Amino acid sequence: MRRRGWSGGGGRWLVWTGRVVLWALIVVIVVNGVRAPFERFTSNQGVTGAPSAPADSGFPVQQGAAFANQFAAVYLNFDGTNPEQRDTRLTDFLADGVERRFGWNGFGRMAAGAIQFHSIEVADANNARVQVSFQSGARRWLLSVPVYQADGRFVVSGLPALLPSGGAAGLPAIAGPDRDANLEDQLRQTLEGFFRAYASGNAAELKLYAADGATIEGLGGQFTLAQLNSVVAPLGGETGRDVTVTVTWSITAADAAAVPTDDPADPAAQPALLEQAYQLTMEKQGDKWLVRQVQGASRSVG
């Protein structure tokens, strides 16, 4: 009798294996199809408000910002009694054939200072808009400057635009800390001595008020303590506190030429007073409170 070939589980095993592979392939395709648009969406969410050009667009951002700063310092300062001075200074910022007054009619005056880079919007490897912040009179402004570059050389590619800066942020009121009035009274004499030493920069005197291991550098004698105004010591630990202190400095002119005259009625000849706020990290060592660190206060105190 002729033996028949075996047609049992082996064929079924191959069929089931094929089905498993097919379903696995389908799952991978579905998962990738769902994940791809989700990843594109989340990546777009993370760059809201960012420049439209990629980070590797090739535009030299740092050099372009410096160029726009220099241009703004010339463009924003003019005097109708000597318009040619500004014309000459603008030459290296403008393309050949561009009129050197660059939109100014040659009359009046404008003075601007505190010029700083604010932001940049890069269009491509050659073009960008640079925003520069500046102050004129009592207000802050922005100047938008279109800039073109090629081979590391820059030129202003169009008329600039003045923009508002948005003004100062509203500062919300905050509750003051629960204060340790006894410690504040106790610290006043120590802090008066410390700030006199801090103003002079005398290392030996400062060491008397410094906590063990702390090195405090003073202001080098350009200031003297006119008044210790306030001490705010919060309730807290027995061995360490962050104490906020406001003082009034009397400012000594670093250069005698800074005083225009010897006339005592001249306001510039009078002592300058400047109130400032400090935060001191203080530690109690033995029966003394000593200074570990000096830094500026984070918020104004009364």
Image: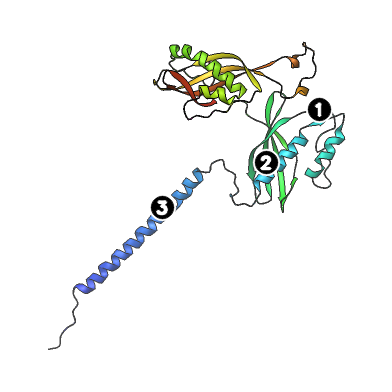
Q: Secondary structure at mark 3?
A: helix
Report the disc number at residue 97.
none
Compare marks 2 and 1 and give the one earlier in the sequence. 1
State if disc 1 and disc 2 touch (CB < 8 Å): no
Q: Is residue 81 above or below residue 8?
A: above
Give the residue displayed 55% in from the left and 15% down from the top.
192
Report the disc number at residue 130.
2
Q: Quadrant of residue 70?
A: top right
Its colouring scheme is rainbow
Distance from Cα at disc 3 to Cα at disc 1: 62 Å
The amino acid sitting under disc 1 is: Arg
Report the side of 96 relative to 45 (left or right).
Answer: right
Image quadrant occupied by the N terminus: bottom left
Name the residue carrying label 3.
34
The amino acid sitting under disc 3 is: Val
Q: Quadrant of residue 133?
A: top right
Magenta residue span: 210-215
From this viewpoint, is residue 248 visible?
A: yes
Label 1, residues with CA under 10 Å away: few <14, some 14-19, many ≥20: few
Compare marks 3 and 1 and give the one earlier in the sequence. 3
Name the residue carrying label 1.
109
Q: Is residue 167 above or below residue 122?
A: above
Distance from Cα at disc 2 to Cα at disc 1: 24 Å
Depth-wise, is mark 2 or mark 3 nearer the camera?
A: 2
Compare marks 2 and 3 and give the one earlier in the sequence. 3
Report the side of 4 relative to 166 (left or right).
Answer: left
Inspect the magenta stretch and tell me whether residue 259 lies in it: no
Residue 5 horizontal/vertical position (percent) = 19, 82
